[in-house]
Image: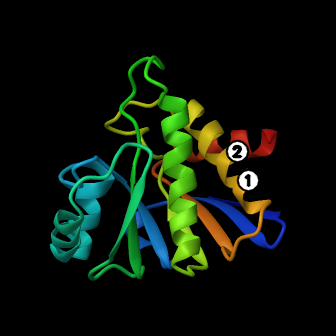
Amino acid sequence: MNMERKIRNSILELTEGDITEMDTDAIVNAANSRLQHGGGVAGAIVRKGGWIIQEESNKIGYVPVGEAAITTAGKLKTKYVIHAVGPVWRDGNENEDEKLKNATLNSLKLADRNNLRSIAFPAISAGIFGFPIDRCAKIMLSTTIEYLNEETRLERVIFCLYGKKNFEIFQKELEAS
């Protein structure tokens, strides 16, 4: 399944699949603040890409919620991994929406600062961090569309969604925006 929308000079794409298989300049890892990549998307990235990703993350150390850091990608098809620290869902009581928006925005800015042309995102915080997927889709897509309407070198931003249900939630949100 696939859906594309042109936004100024860029393409925003939705696809269902495995983010570790993406052949983009960077993939985004839904990371924790300590950059310990044990479970979820992070665990899969290190298992496929190799321990070098964890070693580089250890050198970076701590990344605050809403921020992002970049490492190489080991044996993955992509060149870089951008580690975006999304919020753990606390019933919306701890500014989670703003933190997710910042994690998305800072990943896009980091890609631009590193002259990258393409980036693939998962649904940040919507897995083991418990962020509601429909709310995640709304925040991540609106933040990305706003960003792509400004000056950017990014030519392609892909949301690589795990499972048909998650794809359909993002698709419905993109169609409504």
The answer to whether mark 2 and mark 1 are in CB contact below 8 A is yes
Q: Quadrant of residue 72?
A: bottom left
User: Which quadrant: the C terminus?
Assistant: top right
Q: Residues within 10 Å of mark 1 (few under 14, many from 20)?
A: many
> Helix or strand or loop: what does disc 2 sit on?
helix
In the current view of this chain or complex, which residue is farthest to the right?
8
Q: Pick the residue in front: 52 or 58.
A: 58
The amino acid sitting under disc 1 is Ile
What is the C-alpha distance between the residues marked 2 and 1?
Answer: 5 Å
Residue 163 coordinates in the image, percent (x, y): 47, 48
Residue located 54% across and 51% down the image: 104
Q: Pick the residue in front: 77 or 93.
A: 93
> Helix or strand or loop: what does disc 1 sit on?
helix
Residue 49 coordinates in the image, percent (x, y): 26, 75
The amino acid sitting under disc 2 is Ser
Residue located 57% across and 62% down the image: 108
Residue located 59% across and 73% down the image: 112
Residue 50 coordinates in the image, percent (x, y): 19, 75
Mark 1, residue position: 145
**Is 121 on the left-hand or right-hand side of 18?**
right
Q: Pick the residue in front: 107 or 138.
A: 107
Residue 92 coordinates in the image, percent (x, y): 48, 20
Residue 142's disc number: 2
**Is 163 on the left-hand or right-hand side of 45?**
right
Q: Is residue 51 above or below residue 60?
A: below
Q: Quadrant of residue 137?
A: top right
Q: Is residue 114 above or below residue 1?
A: below
